[in-house]
Amino acid sequence: MAKLVTQLTKCTAQTFSCATRINLFSHPVSRVSMHLSRSISTTRCLKVGRLFAKSHEWIVVNGNIGVVGISHHAQETLGDVVYVQLPAVELVVNTGEECGAIESVKAVSEIYSPVSGKILDINEMILQVPGLINVSCYDNGWLFKIELGNPDELKNLLSDEAYNLYLLSDQH
């Protein structure tokens, strides 16, 4: 167990600038565990930036690049995903514009771009294994990366909390 804590602590010290090797390794294990748990909590806070469109796509933005996928609610509603059609790289899309499709055993659903911009990359892995969307819609099941055309459009998207309230409403 101590070896695992040491390895995790080293990783934490390399990953988070606020937790240096000196302050992590100069304290007894109980203090190291406290620093480690603080770092793990910090990691969760970094994922709070996910924004949602009412059409059930999500986007996480880093700089001027966004990663887009579909929400857990959307993949759950669709059922087992069997085919994914993604937009072409270099395609320029507008907010709310259809840019792909997802086919499941239940239905076919369009993919809409949550923001305007140019498609930079697509997730080749889900073309081969579409069911990855059902297993990991927020991580490995992302759809495409987009260069933001107008970052102000992010203001029109829903936070995680607002999206959850939207799901509880009759509007979706």
Image (cartoon, rainbow, N blue to C red):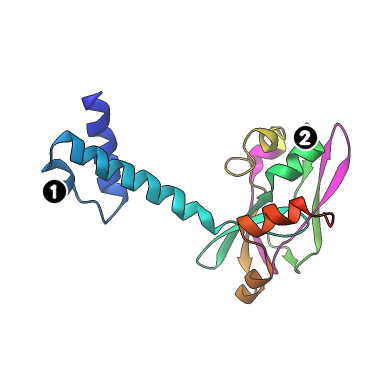
**Mark 2 neighbour class, 10 Å CA radius: few under 14, some 14 to 19, many 20 or more:** many
Which tag is nearer the camera, tag 1 or tag 2? Answer: 1
Task: Give the image location of residue 94, x and y in percent.
Answer: 76, 69
**Mark 2 or mark 1, which is nearer the start of the sequence?**
1
Q: Residue at x 79, y 55 (%)?
A: 169
Q: Which residue is mark 2?
A: 81
Q: Quadrant of residue 5?
A: top left
User: In the rendered image, is residue 83 in sight?
Assistant: yes
Toward the viewer: 148 or 2? 2
**Is residue 38 one of those drawn in magenta?**
no
Please identify the quadrant where the N terminus is shown.
top left
Residue visible at 69% across and 35% down?
A: 134
- x, y percentage for residue 25? 14, 41
Q: Secondary structure at mark 2?
A: strand
Q: Is residue 112 magenta?
A: yes
The residue at which mark 1 appears reads as: 22
Range of residues picked out in magenta: 102-126
User: Split into 4 quadrants, where in the image is the C terminus?
Assistant: bottom right
Q: CA distance from mark 1 to mark 2?
A: 48 Å
Let me know if residue 120 appears in the view.
Answer: no
How far across and down, in percent of the image, does residue 101 sit?
Answer: 82, 48
- Along the horizontal axis of the image, is 15 left or right of 53? left
Residue in the foreground of this view, choosing between 112 and 91: 112
Identify which amino acid the numbered label 2 is placed on. Answer: Val
